[in-house]
Amino acid sequence: MLLADLLDLVLPATCAGCDEPATGVLCAPCREALAAALPGRTRPVPEPPGLPPVFALAAYAGSVRRMLIQYKERNRHELTPVLGGLLARVVAASVPPGPITLVPVPATSAAARRRFGDHIDRLAADAASTLRRRGVEVDVAGLLRALPKREDSVELSAAGRAATAREAFAVRGRRPAVRGTVVLVDDIITTGSTLAASAARLAAAGVRVDRIAVLAATQRAV
């Protein structure tokens, strides 16, 4: 038996959203709060040129912020179905009826190694599975790849983020095939520079991004 399994026997489980004791990954109050969250349009201020319409579940605060940190930086992969289901709600609220293609914003290879896999790929796959169970035609297309030696955008200014984002991604293949509404998906929007640059790269390859779906926005302005 692993040490983590032994600890689970003697220590109470804690909620990934508030650190209170819980019998599952989330406590009842956090589950209720997330169930009540309504996806909506969000815009960073200032909004970068060329940014497609962005929809988010909630502000990057409280239990949503803690869940994302636990998922990304503490490798709590048991949150994948929870966050993937929430992302599916954002996608469903943002698109017209019809087929959907989800395009994940990829992590760098270094970040993927640190997190034991690309965290957005996992969420996109789970969101797609959730939507398919609801009868939606949806594909996941890994059209973008992250280029190496990308700076950590957390420490950069808005101008620095924009400059870095323009050189951060490349498109896989010369003529990517997609169908229906194309939705770029990520976990958080801050300045929007990375998402705008990703959409521009895809547009240059002939793929128009119709919507962007994220779980959280640092600025939740409608």
Image: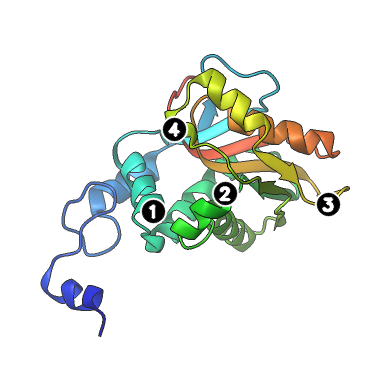
Q: Are marks 4 and 1 in contact (CB under 8 Å)?
A: no
In the image, what residue type sits under mark 2?
Thr
**Distance between the alpha carbons at the discs numbered 4 and 1:** 17 Å
Q: As drawn, which residue projects farthest toward the right?
A: 175
Residue 192 makes an appearance in the image: no
- Chain-order first, disc 2 or disc 3: 2
Disc 4: which residue = 154
Looking at the image, which is closer to me, 93 or 178?
178
Residue linked to disc 1: 71
Instruction: Residue at 16%, 57% (x, y): give it.
Output: 21
The Cα–Cα distance between marks 3 and 4, rounded to whole angstroms, is 29 Å
Real-space CA distance between mark 2 and mark 4, rounded to the nearest whole angstrom = 14 Å
Nearer the observer: mark 1 or 2; the answer is 2
Which residue is drawn at the image coordinates 60% and 30% (left, top)?
164
Q: Residue at x 54, y 56 (%)?
A: 118
The percent position of residue 220, horizontal first and vertical second, equals 45, 24
**Residue lying furthest front:** 149
Answer with mark 2 or mark 4, whichever residue precedes in sequence: 2
Residue 110: image location, x then y, percent: 52, 53
Residue 108, which numbered label? 2
For the N terminus, the quadrant is bottom left
Q: Amino acid at mark 3?
A: Gly
- Looking at the image, residue 169 sits to the left or right of residue 16; the answer is right
Q: Nearer the viewer, residue 156 or 5?
A: 156
Secondary structure found at label 3: loop
Q: Dot 4 lies on which element?
A: helix
The x, y position of residue 107, in whole percent, is: 56, 48
Q: Earlier in the sequence, mark 3 or mark 4?
A: 4
Q: Which residue is mark 3?
A: 173
Q: Amino acid at mark 1?
A: Tyr
